[in-house]
Amino acid sequence: MSDLTTPRSVLVRYRQAIIDRSADALADLYAPDGVHELPFVFPGMPAAYRGREEVRAAYRAAWGASPARPMEIHEVATHESTDPEVIVAEQVVKGEIAGTGQPFAFPGLLVLRVRDGLIVRARDYMDGLAVAHTMGRLPAVAAALGATATG
């Protein structure tokens, strides 16, 4: 495996794409049929993006609509796996909200499976409620959760 195709190298480029808010750079890290899963889903969030082009479209739309500006990704820990295709990153995405300067910090756990230098599966365990709170969407999420529980 060349240095650019290792899971660690892909993780570095993944993080840079997040900081740059580049849906193209992010999507280009995925295999054409790669899957990005969001296991901690709640109303208003998809459970997964299937395929490189769905990843591209979803992140382009999300970043286009969001005032959140990631500025750094603090690495808490990165764990190499006994499986040479897998890397696990504990991290905190830090940044600010455009227009207000309000800081945010979203903790998460990212599990990447990289084959031939491309992500074939990403499991993104981000703190979606913290994201919703920062974006001012927490009341809507809570209302949707309440409707789901009573419906």
Image: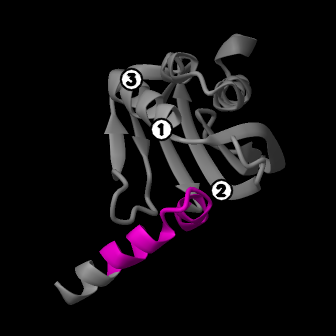
- SS class, disc 3: helix
Distance from the alpha carbon under mark 2 to that under mark 1: 21 Å
Distance from the alpha carbon under mark 1 to that under mark 3: 20 Å
Disc number lying in front (1 or 3)? 1
Q: Residues within 10 Å of mark 3 (few under 14, many from 20)?
A: many
Write down the residue under mark 2.
108
Q: Earlier in the sequence, mark 1 or mark 3?
A: 3
76 w.r.t. 26: above or below: below
Q: Residues within 10 Å of mark 2 (few under 14, many from 20)?
A: some
- SS class, disc 2: strand
Mark 2 residue type: Gly
Residue at point 21%, 89% (across, down): 150
Residue at point 58%, 33% (across, down): 85
61 w.r.t. 137: above or below: above
Q: Position of residue 61 (x, y in %)?
A: 41, 32
Quadrant into which the N terminus falls: top right
Write down the residue under mark 3.
52
Q: Is residue 49 left or right of residue 113?
A: left
Residue 133's quadrant in the figure?
Answer: bottom right
Q: Earlier in the sequence, mark 2 or mark 1?
A: 1
Q: Position of residue 139 (x, y in %)?
A: 45, 73
Mark 1 residue type: Ala
Write down the residue under mark 1.
65
47 w.r.t. 32: above or below: below
Q: Earlier in the sequence, mark 2 or mark 3?
A: 3
Identify the magenta region: 128-145
Q: Main secondary structure of the magenta part?
A: helix
Give the farthest residue toward the front: 99
Question: Of 131 and 66, which appears nearest the observer?
Answer: 66
Distance from the alpha carbon under mark 2 to that under mark 3: 22 Å
